[in-house]
Structures are given as C-alpha cells and as structure tokens.
Image (spheres, rainbow, N blue to C red):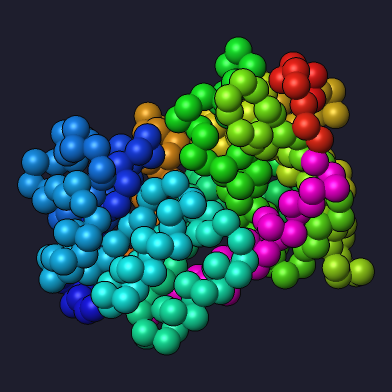
Amino acid sequence: MSSSSNTPWRVAIVGLGNVSTHQVAALENIPLLDLVAACDTDRRKAESVPSNVEFFANYNRLLANTSHFDVILISTPPHTHLELASKALRRGVAVLLEKPATLDLADFDRLSEQAESAQTFLAVAFHAMFALDLLYYLDRADEFAALGDLISFRCRFRDPYVENGKVLSRALSLGGSWLDSGINALSVLGKLRSPESFVVADSEHYTLASGDQKPINVRSVVEFRTVESECALKGGTIETDWLSGKDEKLTELRFQTGKLLLHHSKQSVFQMHSDGKAQLRSNLGHGTERLTNHYRGVFADLVRMLEAQRSNLAFARRLHSLLFSAIDETTTRLIADPLDP
C-alpha cells in the first residue's frame, strides 16, 4: 500500500448503516482519500453512495478486487469485526476498524498480532474524540487556566434506543449501551489524559429482558480513578443510557474554581457559573451535522497515520482494556421495567 503526496488513498466502506451517510459526506472533504467502493448485503444501499462508487453485495467479491482500493473501513456490527478484519488483513489490505474493534481483549490482540505479522496497517476509528467542542477546549486550554486544575469529569452518553419496553431492532446489533457508547466516552477521556492514567473503580450495569429479545445492556454507570497520586485529576464517571429517551452526549469538566460543559450534541462549549447559569463560550457546528464533523477528524487522522506508517493500536488497546474491565457480571442487574432502572 502506498500513495504519493498528490495521489489519494482509495477507500472501500463495508457496512452502509446509519452512520455511513456521515462517513461518505466526511470523505468528500478529505482530498487525500477517495471513496471508490462500498459493500453491504442489502443491495438497496447502493443508492446511498455516489454513482461512481463501485458497489458489492458480497464481501468476498469485494476482497477479490483489492487492486481497486488501498484502505478498507469496516463499519459493520461489532460481532462481525474479527472475521471481516482478519480476511482483509490476510489480503494485505490496510484496515480502519470501527469502534469497538472487537467484543473482548483477546480478539483485539489476535487482530493486532495478525496485522503485525503481515506488516499490514490496522487502526481503530474513534469518532467521538474528534468532537469539535473537545478539540476547542484542548486547543485553548490556556484560556481556561483561571479555572485551575481539572479535578473530575462526568460523561453522559444517551441514545433513545428503548421504546415501549423493548430495544429498537436497529440498536440490537450494537451490543448494548456500554459497548456502543462507553468506548466513545473513553475516547474523549483518552484525549483529556493518557488512558494509562485510569483504572476502573466501580461499575453498575442494567440489562433489559423483554419479550423474545435476548437480555441486553441498556444503562451503565462506571467510576474511574487515576493511578497518579500527585495528579489533581482524581477520577470521574461515565454514564451510558438507552432508557432516557434522549439523544444527548455531554462531558462535564470540573476544575478547582469552576466547570465547563462540552455539549457534544450541540457542538458547543459552555462555562457553568456558581449561580447555575451557563455561558456559551463557543458554538462550533456551523450547520454541519455532528457526526459528519467527527468523521472529518477521523479521516484526516487516518491520512496522517497512513503517511507516517504508524497506527493507534496501543492507544486503542488501552481504551478497550478499560471498556472490558468495566464489565463485571456481579454488578449487572436485570430489569423488567425500563422506567425503573
């Protein structure tokens, strides 16, 4: 796999789900990436990509045409990632794998070892870490120095995936609220501090069983603490929730003398005052949808990694280690009434 500074890397997308609209839109803004192929078992999805994009309804047939593309983005349900990524790596194709990369750390390590053995590029896409509000705060940390040191955080990632006591069919393949959104929140956390700084302190998980559906995680509360005794940041909480009926992603940062609210859904940064009022510091969306902006960041970072021939696997492994270590069956509660977690 190679590309000159003037020749775009050719990209194939596998899995044209809800997020693919944003991925395709984002790719249009990255000059050094060119979407040339797409694959989905639903042939009707061919209409969701530009007409000049070659469409495949069979993954093996896509892989039989690897000379047509350089990088493959695997954006299918998490339980399919191991098999699909492994097949692509065996073909020597560079792989960008959607989060969560796998369903356990052992499978993550298997893919990493396969990529290393084959000397083939493998990386993981964490779209939430490219939220414009998060990047705004990180780029302008000096402006907020008067607030003092960061001492705690609280991430709340909510999706309206439960209706009438049942998980929506389109959300079942996501693997539950913690697997789907916990990894997003962890990637935000990993931008604030090195993920090596954190360990899981406590966790509670709520699983919904309804009708003929298998039990699935619909709410989680996970507490983290830092391992650095002299660090002002002592820890914080990540909450994921499919029960609230809200589509809302927030990260609250508490400092020694104040608070900031990174409103990921609104792509805005607010400073919270002691009287409870919120002062808008910046509104960053400018009419572009949140996920489209996120994936612009993902793909710009992909170009940087490809050019440098480096990957984010070490970072990704630590995030997945935290994700899986928070899953403890002894802290899981089965609920029958989704209104009473």
> What is the number of callouts on the image?
0
The structure residue drawn at horizontal position 52% and vertical position 41%, both measured from the top left corner, is 174
**Frontmost residue, 126 versus 131:** 126
Looking at the rendering, in which quadrant would you find the N terminus? Answer: bottom left
Q: Is residue 200 above or below residue 333?
A: below
The secondary structure that most of the magenta stretch takes on is: helix
Residue 195 highlighted magenta (yes or no): no
Q: Residue at x 57, y 37 (%)?
A: 264
Residue closest to the far front = 212
330 and 123: which is toward the camera = 330
Q: Does the segment drawn in magenta span residue 322?
A: yes
Quarter in which the C terminus is drawn:
top right
- The residue at the point 80 percent across, 62 percent down is 199
| Spot occupied by residue 112 in the image (x, y as percentages of width and height) | 49, 76
Q: 201 or 234: which is nearer to us? A: 201
Left or right of 247: which side holds 10?
A: left
Point out residue 202 in the picture as x, y percentages from the top left corner: 86, 50
Please say if 88 is above or below 207: below
Compared with residue 253, is residue 215 higher up or lower down, i.e. above or below?
above
Residue extent of the magenta highlight: 309-332
At 32% from the left edge and 76% from the top edge, which residue is drawn? 90
Q: Is 240 positioned to the left or the right of 236 in the image?
A: left
Q: Residue furthest top?
A: 164
Say if residue 101 shows up in the picture. Answer: yes
Q: For residue 192, say whether it is visible.
A: no
Q: Would you place residue 168 above or below residue 63 in this image?
A: above
Decide which of 103, 313 is in the foreground and name it: 103
Left or right of residue 153: residue 241? left
- Position of residue 101 measured from the top left corner of the image (x, y, whole percent): 50, 59
Indicate left or right for 169 with 66 as reference: right
- Residue 210 is situated, as x and y percent measured from the top left of the image, at 65, 23
